[in-house]
Amino acid sequence: MDTTTAKEQSARCRVHYRTVRSSVTLPALSEVFAGLESVSILGGNETKRDAGRFSYWAAEPKEIFQFEKTQKEPFEKLQKVLSKYKLESIPAEDLPRGIFLGGWVGYLSYELNQYIEKLPESTIDDLKLPLIRLCFYDKIICYDHIEKNFRLIGLELPQDSQGPDDKLDELKEIIRKAEKINLPPIPPADLSSIDSAKVKCNMSKEYYMEAAGEIKRHIVDGDVYQVNFSQRFESSFSGPPIELFHWQNYHNPNGYAAYIDAGDFTAVSTSPEMFITVCDGIISTKPIKGTRPRLQGNQPETLRENRRNFNELQESEKEKAELNMIIDLERNDIARICIPGSRGVTQPRTIEEYPTIYHGVATVSGKLQNRISFCEIIKALFPGGSITGAPKISAMKIIDRLEPTTRSIYTGAIGFIGLDGNVSLNIAIRTVIIKDETAYTQTGGGIVADSDAECEWEETLTKANALMAGIVTVNENAKTN
């Protein structure tokens, strides 16, 4: 898995595709794929329209690359694997720009930072998941949320036992199967019944308060300006992971949602945050900083409360300063790999609405230097500054010392690396890791000089409640069924 021959590195691929229309629902398609091997789903809900336009479904990869913590040289191994397949030519111009034409889908764990910078390793790795897991897919179903059609994409590979037409026929048959599925109604979201403060956690409230105080002392001492501090919740999980994905995509849909079935464990992500997008040589990152709750319903009192929360976030000097710090950090990171003078803030601070939350966001972009590899991009930007703090290295050292357990996939990145050089990776926040009938949910927030520790604690609970509600609902359904 970790070695490739020169012949394998030069394998040339051709893209074949068909455009089809179908009445199939996206959840039904996800349900069918969940029954296949090594499934990856990116998006799968209507909010994807505004976050890259396309949703993807893939299964039964040609090969899987995993890098374990006991191994060495992750980026050398990763670059060798990514170089194994190349597109013979760019497909027809009638395909929209940015579409995933086949390649690798999976995740990078937060702890890859230890192979980029010299950092301590004092946290406990109790989950023991691979630091990198990427699947090479030669068959993908893509849904275009703007044109409302499906594209069946198949790669023609050298000495392949299955021809491209057979691959496209196989994908068409999956859609036909999904057309016959009628899923039961999604149970309601009852966030008011969830109290994450009573769920098993890797730290007590007292520990959190003490840690927040220590972070603020580091800020006063000039060691750091901001630290993104998180806590992890743990609960039993007895239902199918795909049901949690359905529930989140209905009640808490976000454009960078993802579902990764690795067999021994599953990641269900409802992330609203883009880590990086690379398209036609332009790289963008979209950090999130600042959160307020958004209530459901159209009652006058609810609308007034939402307007108050929106305005409070919009006018908060603390939240403005917090995002500006991360914008500066990302501008500096991007400058390391972009053509001088090409980087800039392409979207100033904006308050965006999500199903249960308001967020402050901004976008930083630049034109990549020639021949910059994916691994060079990751070394320059990973992990995202919005989930570490600033300066990044100092913040990561504090995180390692204060957070009891490794983050693993949480605050890493999930998405695709295309054979054509296009990339789309989320920041894996709002992400549940399911392993051994246990669901691990981790949430955090940025602590700065004027942070109120009690408010920061409550913010982590607000974020966790939206995830815990789905876990509780799926567990209850499993008991009744």
Image (cartoon, rainbow, N blue to C red):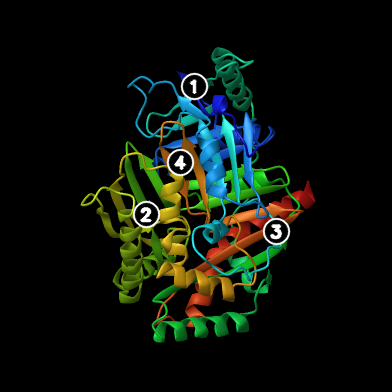
Residue that badge 4 annotates: 46
> First in sequence: mark 3 or mark 4?
4
154 relative to 353 in the view: left or right = right
Q: Which mark, by number, is residue 286?
A: 2
- Of residues 477 and 398, the one nearer the viewer is 398
Q: Name which residue lies at 56% across and 17% down.
A: 158
The residues bearing labels 4 and 2 have C-alpha atoms spaced at a distance of 20 Å
Q: Are marks 1 and 3 in contact (CB under 8 Å)?
A: no
The residues bearing labels 2 and 3 have C-alpha atoms spaced at a distance of 29 Å
Q: In the picture shown, does residue 165 fall above or below 102?
A: above
Q: In the picture shown, does residue 103 fall above or below 327?
A: above
Q: Are marks 4 and 2 in contact (CB under 8 Å)?
A: no
> First in sequence: mark 1 or mark 2?
1
Residue that badge 1 annotates: 13
Task: From the top left corner, tell me how far across and down residue 367 is, in percent.
Answer: 28, 45
Query: What amino acid is found at the position of numbered circle 1 in the picture?
Result: Cys
* CA neighbours of label 2 inside 10 A, class few (<14), some (14 to 19), many (20+): many
Residue that badge 3 annotates: 127
Q: In the picture shown, does residue 301 fall above or below 137?
A: below
* CA neighbours of label 4 inside 10 A, class few (<14), some (14 to 19), many (20+): some
Query: What amino acid is found at the position of numbered circle 2 in the picture?
Result: Lys
